[in-house]
Amino acid sequence: MAERPYTLLSCSMSIDGYIDGASESRLLLSNDLDFDRVDQVRAEVDAILVGATTVRNDNPRLLVRDAARRRARLDRGLPEQPVKVTVTQRGLLESSRRFFADDGSRKLVYANTRVAPALERRIGGLSEVVDGGDPVPMTGLVRDLGRRGVRRLMVEGGGAMHTQFLAEDLVDELHLVVAPFFVGEPAARRFVGEGDFPWHPGRRARLAEVRQLGDVVLLRYALSERFEQA
């Protein structure tokens, strides 16, 4: 059986733990220095995963932007762009989202068994649709990515994905960026929801690095024994 990918979870949040505001406008929680750092991390992975809610609400491109980093990937025998991956339980994905843009990247959509056939008819020409089960378990998803040759996976959100990956103990490394302000809106989305997480007062995560990037701070946590081998 293929080993699951080394998994890095990346998130930016406010001081009080929110990853977005309650309005429809996007809340910027990072800065140019951190955007460049994230671009470098993207350039080092085989696949980038976000949930369907993030695809709908944030409409991310999920691309390596720097041309030199893209050339370096090609020099290493990798595709110019990492594989884009998303997960949907309800099939609420539209082809107009930038996730599905004709940008040279391979796309994978892991869909709930109940919606996979309809989704295949709607977006099958833009992305491979994988029947992920009912519901789609993250443990099965990462095993399948491993079988497809993904060795390093970056999970970029949103809160439901963060919660599932962390609660299922599938994360080797956590990059948590804290922005210097509060949100304080109960309707806004948080970094994680309720869950039975492996890290608690009796099992503390190891803080491996603290780095200031302008007015934000990066907290880098080691969450598995594989951290040192990455």
Image: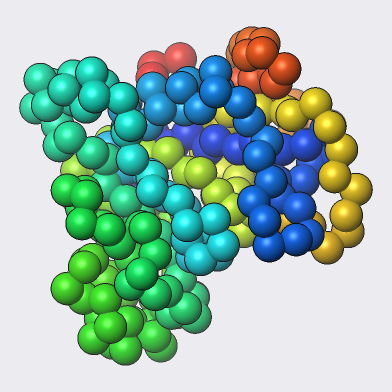
Q: Is residue 188 above or below residue 166?
A: below
Residue at 61% of width from left, 26% of height from top?
A: 31
Let me know if residue 164 appears in the view. no
Residue at 28% of width from left, 83% of height from top?
A: 122
Front residue of 21/77: it is: 21
Q: Is residue 52 above or below residue 150?
A: below
Front residue of 4/46: it is: 46
Q: Is residue 30 above or below residue 22?
A: above
Image quadrant in which you'd find residue 80: top left
Q: Position of 72 compared to 171: left or right?
A: left
Find residue 215 and report its horizontal and vertical position in percent: 72, 17
Image quadrant where one finds the C terminus: top left
Find residue 132 and report its horizontal and vertical position in percent: 36, 71
Residue at 38% of width from left, 48% of height from top?
A: 61
Q: Position of 93 compared to 145: left or right?
A: right
Let me know if residue 90 appears in the view. yes
Number of numbered discs on residues = 0
Front residue of 24/64: it is: 24
Q: Position of 174 compared to 25: left or right?
A: left
Find residue 202 and report its horizontal and vertical position in percent: 81, 31
Q: Is residue 203 above or below residue 228?
A: below
Residue at 55% of width from left, 49% of height from top?
A: 157
Front residue of 199/95: it is: 95
Find residue 176 and report its horizontal and vertical position in percent: 64, 30
